Amino acid sequence: MSRSDSHTGPHDGRVTLGVPRWTLLVAALGVLFIMLPIVGMTLRVDWSRFGALVTSEAAVAALLLSLRTAMMSTVLCLLFGVPMALGLARSRFPGQRLVRAVVLLPLVLPPVVGGIALLSTFGRRGLLGETFEVLGIQIAFSTTAVVLAQTFVALPFLVLSVEATLRASGARFEAVAATLGATPGTVFRRVTLPLVLPGLLSGAVLAFARALGEFGATLTFAGSLQGVTRTLPLEIYLQRETDADAAVALALLLVAVALIVMVATHRPRGLS
Amino acid sequence: MSRSDSHTGPHDGRVTLGVPRWTLLVAALGVLFIMLPIVGMTLRVDWSRFGALVTSEAAVAALLLSLRTAMMSTVLCLLFGVPMALGLARSRFPGQRLVRAVVLLPLVLPPVVGGIALLSTFGRRGLLGETFEVLGIQIAFSTTAVVLAQTFVALPFLVLSVEATLRASGARFEAVAATLGATPGTVFRRVTLPLVLPGLLSGAVLAFARALGEFGATLTFAGSLQGVTRTLPLEIYLQRETDADAAVALALLLVAVALIVMVATHRPRGLS
Amino acid sequence: MTFELAAVMRRRGLEVAFTVSPGETVALLGSNGAGKSTILELCAGLLRPDSGKATLDGQVFFDLAAGGADRAGGADRADGRRPGIFTPPHARRTVLLAQEPLLFPHLNVRDNVAFGPRSAGESRAASRLLADEWLAAAEVSDFADRRPGMLSGGQAQRVAVARALAASPRLLLLDEPMTALDVAAVPAQRQLLHRVLLDRSVILVTHDPLDALALADRVIVLQGGRIIEEGPTRSVFAHPQAEFTRALTFGLDLSASP
Amino acid sequence: MTFELAAVMRRRGLEVAFTVSPGETVALLGSNGAGKSTILELCAGLLRPDSGKATLDGQVFFDLAAGGADRAGGADRADGRRPGIFTPPHARRTVLLAQEPLLFPHLNVRDNVAFGPRSAGESRAASRLLADEWLAAAEVSDFADRRPGMLSGGQAQRVAVARALAASPRLLLLDEPMTALDVAAVPAQRQLLHRVLLDRSVILVTHDPLDALALADRVIVLQGGRIIEEGPTRSVFAHPQAEFTRALTFGLDLSASP
Amino acid sequence: AGTAGASSGATGASTEQGETLTVFAAASLTETFTELADRFEAVHPGVTVALNFGGSADLVTQIREGAPADVFAAADARTMAKLSGDGLLDGVPVVFATNTLMIAVPADNPAGIDSFADLAAPNVDVVVCAPQVPCGTALPALEAAAGVRLAPVSEENAVTGVLGKVTSGDADAGLVYVTDVTSAGDAVLGIPVPEADQAVNEYPIAVVAGSEQALLGAAFTRFVTGATGQTVLGAAGFGAP
Ligand SMILES: Nc1ncnc2c1ncn2[C@@H]1O[C@H](COP(=O)(O)OP(=O)(O)OP(=O)(O)O)[C@@H](O)[C@H]1O
Ligand SMILES: Nc1ncnc2c1ncn2[C@@H]1O[C@H](COP(=O)(O)OP(=O)(O)OP(=O)(O)O)[C@@H](O)[C@H]1O
Ligand SMILES: [Mg+2]
Ligand SMILES: [Mg+2]
């Protein structure tokens, strides 16, 4: 226990329990397994060209587009995903397991296939294509398509995280709130949401990260045009065709952005 | 309430609360958004050739390889991921947030870049390449490489799900167990694990699904060699070069397999 | 505010019917597992009975016919759904103080107590003022800004009482509200409850005959999910019939008073 | 089995020192928030004091020097770490029965009670047998196969008592073990505890003077984290000094007995 | 080519019965090289040809990282040049096929395209391959030859991306190689571009440096450039070297 430990923040004299020592060793190995490749990649970067590479017009455009679309997708995921998680965790209806499985499907679809699937629905000749055409909306080749593709692949992450947290935290406090006169809406806003905040945050980070790294579905569904649909992963892929070093440099940029976003936003706290 | 509701299973007369009606509507929209593209894709399948396509030697080999490797990756993810989640959720150490962010990085790396990163570490010329070469082990371009690539991309899913559940369920029962004389190992096995089972299961399903759909990292790090490294997503990608219909048929096979696995295994239950 | 209840819940072996007059406080007595908490949860709307009917001042809380499976000649509906009315908890304006305090862990003590008024549509400021009044009444003002996790057991219990009372329910359901209170606090809390309960319909679960005597106009004694004894507190305690009631009142000498 | 405790925990305003002799039962009395539960959690190893020392029969539970920040001339270590010994809960063989039952929700009642013996290395069969004995002693054998979620409040409390006793601790820490029990059960439970406590070192928190009288050899009265009164139960109750103790024992006429 | 090394961990290892030749080939060669491998095995009993397909950048990365490749067939000269520049080739690459660009439109040709110049119309959605990838290599030359600049709505990373959007009808037209139109079958309609022969793309093949099967690799290379190879490639629409 360092001195700062015992004087600040959440350290309240409560003893940490339930972490056998061997798990820390195994955990360290796991962290190493993820960290080594990233270090290995960093060692390959040609630092003399790094600055020029990551500030090129194409790279900057791609990064901005990526950030913008990933943020919008995350918002959409939250909007739709939290109700979906609530429905799966709290209510019972026939076919629930099938619905849950369907919701998880985008996880397992290779992204390219996800893109084909999206084309078959939102494309000009897709299931809903005519509807959109009548409304004067063209989705394919637009930034909207990028957001849709990212939302499609990222949504299951949010749903699953939130659902698991909802199940683990139980419904006792919701019952108390209801007897105190809170309508279902109030219960949701003032009790359920704050209680699942840790799961919600980690789900949102997962969804954002997945959206930020999305490649296959975007390429297949939205295409690849600088400033419109060419996100950073697509730019990386393209760079790689001519200059592997440039690709690695851009990938490192992506890693850095992701790290910043995650360190800055991801602070779930327990409530026990 | 149907009659079967009130007489069977977990329905114990407790009233469902905290699910405002509008969330069900929004949730239904969300489900539709995921389901429609998959339906759309199904409509594109040329059913007359479907049987022949999915039972071709190449398809079967790819499917079996995919199932085998995804299973192994899931086991590895459980083995390393649960201790990692425990370390992140239950103990406090300096740099914890950075470690968490690093653990999540594979989520954000476009898979192709993940493949490059893995090559730069486990490849013949990578960080650890020489060590392995001395030991007579070649990892890259082998089935082992497929498993490593899948584990690399799937591990964060497991860690995050389990961590969120751990945080939501709190540490009170672990304290009780410790005072009853349970060693940290026993606490872990008999209290922590069963209590996070919902999160563990959904995390494992996430990891399995992600591994099953893994494409980019596998292609780059492991190559695409029938029976050895050409998993179903890679086979789909190749089929698409020559015959887009065949690719969709195979994708549908993947969807079916995933659905079966998920409906069969994914039953997290709350413990409240 | 007459409350009328008749409910059957087979899973818990419960079958009861009773009435609470306007402003009356009824004590539910009975051994562990007799069904006291179950009755409160049925009244609050957290449990749905197999059949029965409950109304408060004309508002129907539930009205459920017996399930078809058990009724040989009943008007069984083809789709197997039991027809009926069920009012959700929030629309009942009953408040349940459960056996555990269950304070919201993410709100501080004041906001916990203000939760009821807020849900009833009071402004944030008004709710907080109200909360502070109730916190003072329960003698826990000192902890208003703490998170519930930082309270002792008895402190949490008092906050839970304050939270229940602040919601100003039409029907108040109290499950052992004096648990975990120290001996010095009991008289004050009893007084607080007494004051509050005077003009409200209340169902109070307790294991303490003194609480029943001090607070309840009438007692209902349960055993195995049925009512075995019922009547004005003093007369039941003076001439206990059931064995449980005799054990409960043993040593209290009430035979002299009317 | 002498237990010696001296501990300071500033966050909770606690500073106490006392001893429990082998086989002795000490009752901790005091108002809500006096620090009773905190002391039990310190003994059990769930909390770490700022400084102090505790030993049971020679085994050091903790031995922590005061933090450097408060000791002007102390041997402050450069790295800011406080030196000291801290034995984790599982190695102490103390058992804490907390204010809430906290039964493991994923184990049935029997396995909850068998948890202690199992952790001590007993076989599964032997542990279950033992569990059944304790369940019978606590009069909850009927619920052995139920999940805790299906118990009433009092039933859960009894199971928690059985679980604590089944772990056969060297030092037993009981936080209001009689809460939620019905009046019919109290004498039996008191008897059970009495039998069990006879040959064990026990610290018992209670708000009921009758429990203290029936079960404790000695009482310690706390206020604001300090000991304000201490001595053999009968003599403290006969001649209470502190106001709290007077309120507690009001009506108990013990002045005649020695 | 089917079951090569199905159970062994590493690729390229000799099997007990005979030898394995590992061929890395551009994904666009999947169909033709699978057939060629079968035929090669037929005339070389005991030899198994293991095929590894991928995008050109994938294959270059893999070979650079020491993948056990014996032969490499690329989809354009530039890709091959990267490896020869690194000294990773054994000998000089040989061109074994050529390909020219063609306009692909949905079967019903909704935008009524019938010339390269039509693609420049403002309301026509054209998809092309990015100039960085082999399928886009020839486009700038074609644009120059035709004197038309395109404003594509998407610059794809692979020819499958172009074809996918044309077959789905989301794009009005795409520029792909003749062979791609052939393999896409009825789903798309090919419209020839007269200037295309001024922008020919060449497919080179070479034995990889350090290959343990250099002789067999050379034999395979000859097989591809030889009569059988040319027949198979020609049937798929490739032009002669
Ligand atoms: N999910 C459940 N929750 C609570 N009790 C249940 C449940 N399922 C079954 N029961 C049983 O229903 C009966 C009535 O329980 P209830 O909680 O109403 O008792 P109680 O009168 O409140 O007892 P106590 O004084 O111990 O709190 C008990 O026998 C209990 O075991
Ligand atoms: N995390 C915490 N948990 C419990 N008490 C805390 C915590 N933090 C601070 N406290 C304070 O420490 C003091 C001692 O609390 P403790 O729980 O030991 O009281 P107690 O004597 O057990 O009271 P009670 O009879 O109400 O259970 C109280 O004033 C309480 O508010
Ligand atoms: Mg109860
Ligand atoms: Mg306490």
Image: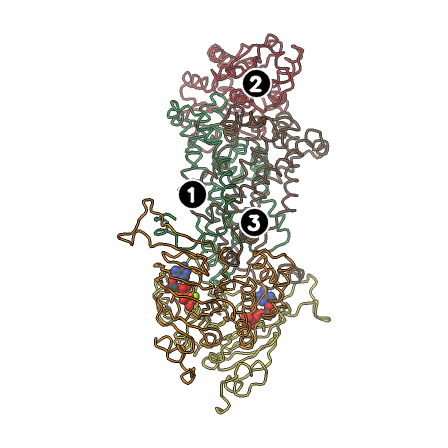
Chain colours: A brown, B green, C orange, D yellow, E red
3D distance between C-alphas at marks 1 and 3: 38 Å
What kind of residue is marked 1?
Answer: Gln
Residue toward you, D218 or E171: E171
Residue toward you, C2 or C104: C2
Give the letter of the chain under mark 1.
A
Give residue C255's quadrant in the image.
bottom left
Question: Cβ of disc 3 within 8 Å of ligand 2?
Answer: no
Q: What element carries label 3?
A: helix
Which residue is disc 2 drawn over? E172
3D distance between C-alphas at marks 1 and 2: 41 Å
What kind of residue is marked 3?
Answer: Ala
**In the image, which disc is placed on residue A96?**
1
Residue at the extreme front of the image, as rendered: C58
Q: Is mark 2 on a helix, strand or loop?
A: loop
Q: Position of residue B178 (x, y in %)?
A: 49, 63
Give the letter of the chain under mark 3.
A
Give the letter of the chain under mark 2.
E
Which residue is disc 3 drawn over? A28
Residue count near mark 1 (Cα–Cα under 10 Å), binned few <14, some 14–19, many ≥20: some
Whether the residues at callouts 2 and 3 have beta carbons within 8 Å, the answer is no
Query: Would you place residue A250 above or below residue D231 in this image?
Result: above
Residue count near mark 2 (Cα–Cα under 10 Å), binned few <14, some 14–19, many ≥20: many
Q: Where is residue D244 in the image (x, y as percent from the top left)?
A: 57, 80
What kind of residue is marked 2?
Answer: Asp
Q: Where is residue C156 in the image (x, y as percent from the top left)?
A: 55, 66
Image depth: mark 1 or mark 3 in front? 1
**Residue C246 in the figure: left or right of residue E146:** left
Q: Is mark 1 on a helix, strand or loop?
A: helix
